[in-house]
Image (cartoon, rainbow, N blue to C red):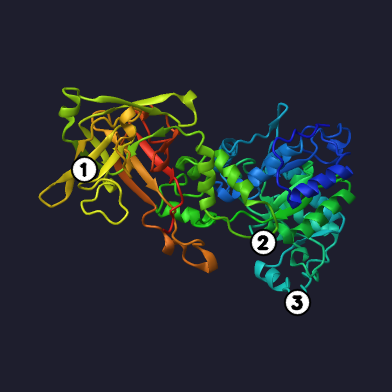
């Protein structure tokens, strides 16, 4: 058996950790065998004891791009497996051929890897497809029929719905419920052989039409779909329902703890019934998997409905699935969020059965916590305004520029220094000048002194305007003997320090300033039109300047622009000749202020 991993930092306890620790203490799964690949009871019977102390799985349906909600399930399942010396499988729940595509399979594999997780353990690849189990699922269905526990129902969908009853009324037996196993088996094989049209009939489990749990009122387990499947082609024209397929997949893979979100809680009794029944029939071997539910991750200011996200893409409200405003993993990645920040947010959100909302600000907080000690610093000007130092020649004579330097990171001297030039003309941010300053404004205005960061003190003497009265340049004079790092640096006291970029060596850049896509915390709550709360300022593109140290940055490089926040070079559009930076997050949360 594998030994438990060494605990670096104690994890906060939650009900799932308590369940796993109880099962390990009691040896609930200690006698479980694993043949190295998924299979039925006979397949695993002669295999050695499973070296994995537990097995979990992340089982997405490949019908869309993963989003931030999936990140919680990914980090939880892979994280618990790693924490307790187990293995987590990546499984594609591809039982619906009409909605699933290889594009989504590829994107899911990429997203899980990017988040930092791997399903290869000891050279064994635990990547599985539900569609590879179709043969066993069909065999199990025939076994249920032969045992008198499943029947083919030819009612219309409307009749089935009406006869199902409701929470106050028991269901009514189907007129086809009393067929003999032989009749049902013949009819089911006709379904398999393509002799009936889509929707003509379904195979139902035969449980209890009077059950107080509506999910046990003879649920459908197979339906007819004449559709091409991305993995099995046209081999099948009948496909298992998710609620039937999912527990079987878990059992074939020897999953111990099947962890899912609360919407599947009502399906757990059928999960249990099916696996107990198949164990009793000898197709599966105990100990079987058990399902446990946790509250899904709900994040404010986003929507996670695949249908609604698709509408945003199709209607070109956003620029594709990887638009940096999208809550998809590919969107978060392009925005610049790090895998570490996403995992940290998920961990901080906790794991419980109680629902609730996680503020989007917690993702930005996790991002700041991750990048504060990592991201190199640089200066950038987002909305440029020219600053002219009118006494340059008096102070520096004929020198075209003066060298300046600053640490790449204030707490990491090993990253070295960045170098840039101070000259007679600079770029500053437009917001750093006010001809008539408001109260508490300590930056440039006529008569006020400020420090140019890493350089010297200047005193504003006025400004230049165009014919329309717009400020085109700020005028200032250098205060001599105030260079940073010299004895005279503290000679003149100032209340304001501003960042700048030298006009001579500034690197022009496109800066994409992203914000939340919606203005309401819950854009689609209560059936609201989510498009009504779209944020018109969720994306602003400006042309600015960055310091020369950034000229050679590769795509997907993160940096802190001092005063402005964390930015990343766009992983698709950025290039040395045309730099493109996406704002990931500001330095502090200012939403709604």
* Residue pointed to by mark 1: 460
The residue closer to the viewer here, 260 or 197, is 260
Q: Is residue 582 visible?
A: yes
Left or right, residue 28 beside residue 155:
right
As drawn, the residue found furthest toward the left would be 467
Q: Is residue 241 visible?
A: no
Q: Residues within 10 Å of mark 1 (few under 14, many from 20)?
A: many
Element type at marker 1?
Answer: strand
The residue closer to the viewer here, 194 or 81, is 81
Left or right, residue 252 beside residue 71:
right
Q: Nearer the viewer, mark 2 or mark 1?
A: 1
| Residue 131 x, y percent position in the rendering | 68, 43
| Residue 151 x, y percent position in the rendering | 79, 60
Mark drawn on residue 97: none
Q: Earlier in the sequence, mark 2 or mark 1?
A: 2
The residue closer to the viewer here, 128 or 25, is 25
Mark drawn on residue 200: 2
Q: Quadrant of the N terminus?
A: top right
Residue at position x 84%, y 46% in the image:
23
Q: Residues within 10 Å of mark 2 (few under 14, many from 20)?
A: some
Residue at position x 20%, y 47% in the image:
446
> Exactly how many numbered labels are in the figure?
3
Left or right, residue 340 beside residue 418:
right
Q: Earlier in the sequence, mark 1 or mark 3?
A: 3
Element type at marker 2?
Answer: loop
* Residue pointed to by mark 3: 169
């Amino acid at each position: 058996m594998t030994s438990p991993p060494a605990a670096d930092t104690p994890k906060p306890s939650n009900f799932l950790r308590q369940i796993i620790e109880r099962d390990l203490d009691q040896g609930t799964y200690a006698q479980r065998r694993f043949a190295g690949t998924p299979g039925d009871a006979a397949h695993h019977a002669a295999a050695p004891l499973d070296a994995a102390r537990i097995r979990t799985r992340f089982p997405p349906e490949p019908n869309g791009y993963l989003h931030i909600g999936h990140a919680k399930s990914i980090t939880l399942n892979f994280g618990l497996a790693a924490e307790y010396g187990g293995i987590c499988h990546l499984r594609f729940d591809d039982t619906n051929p009409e909605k699933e595509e290889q594009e989504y399979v590829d994107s899911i594999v990429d997203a899980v890897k990017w988040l930092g997780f791997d399903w290869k353990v000891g050279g064994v690849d635990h990547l599985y497809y539900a569609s590879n189990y179709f043969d066993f699922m069909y065999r199990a269905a025939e076994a249920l029929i032969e045992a008198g526990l499943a029947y083919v129902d030819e009612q219309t969908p409307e009749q089935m719905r009406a006869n199902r009853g409701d929470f106050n009324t028991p269901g009514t037996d189907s007129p086809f419920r009393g067929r003999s196993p032989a009749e049902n088996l013949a009819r089911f094989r006709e379904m398999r052989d393509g002799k009936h049209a889509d929707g003509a009939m379904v195979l139902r489990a035969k449980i209890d039409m009077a059950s107080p749990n509506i999910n046990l009122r003879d649920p459908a387990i197979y339906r007819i779909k004449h559709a091409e499947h991305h993995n099995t082609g046209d081999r099948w024209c009948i496909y298992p329902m998710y609620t039937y397929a999912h527990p079987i997949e878990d059992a074939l893979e020897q999953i111990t703890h099947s962890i899912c979100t609360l919407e599947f809680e009502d399906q757990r009794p059928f999960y249990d019934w099916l696996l107990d029944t198949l164990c009793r029939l000898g197709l599966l071997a105990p100990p079987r998997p058990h399902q446990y539910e946790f509250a899904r991750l709900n994040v404010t200011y986003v929507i996670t409905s695949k249908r609604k996200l698709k509408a945003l893409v199709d209607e070109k409200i956003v620029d594709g699935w990887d638009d940096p405003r999208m809550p998809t993993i590919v969107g978060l990645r392009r925005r610049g969020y790090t895998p570490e920040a996403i995992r940290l947010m998920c961990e901080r959100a906790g794991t419980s059965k109680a629902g609730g909302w996680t503020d989007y600000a917690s993702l930005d907080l996790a991002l700041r916590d991750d990048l504060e000690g990592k991201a190199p610093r640089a200066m950038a000007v987002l909305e440029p305004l020219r600053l002219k130092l009118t006494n340059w020649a008096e102070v520096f004579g004929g020198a075209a520029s003066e060298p300046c330097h600053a640490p790449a990171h204030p707490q990491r001297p090993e990253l070295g220094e960045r170098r840039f030039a101070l000259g007679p003309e600079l770029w500053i941010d437009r917001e750093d000048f006010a001809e008539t300053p408001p109260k508490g404004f300590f930056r440039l205005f006529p008569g006020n002194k400020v420090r140019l960061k890493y350089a010297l003190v200047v005193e504003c003497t006025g400004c230049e305007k165009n014919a329309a009265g717009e400020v085109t340049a700020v005028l200032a004079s250098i205060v001599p003997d105030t260079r940073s790092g010299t004895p005279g640096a503290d000679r003149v006291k100032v209340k304001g320090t501003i960042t700048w970029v030298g006009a001579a060596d500034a690197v022009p850049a496109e800066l994409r300033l992203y914000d939340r896509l919606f203005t309401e915390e819950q854009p689609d709550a209560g059936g609201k039109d989510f498009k009504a709360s779209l944020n018109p300022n969720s994306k602003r593109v400006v042309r600015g300047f960055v310091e020369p140290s950034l000229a050679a940055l590769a795509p997907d490089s993160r940096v802190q622009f001092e005063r402005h926040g964390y930015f990343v070079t766009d992983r698709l559009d950025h290039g040395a000749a045309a730099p493109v930076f996406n704002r990931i997050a500001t330095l502090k949360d200012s939403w709604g202020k």
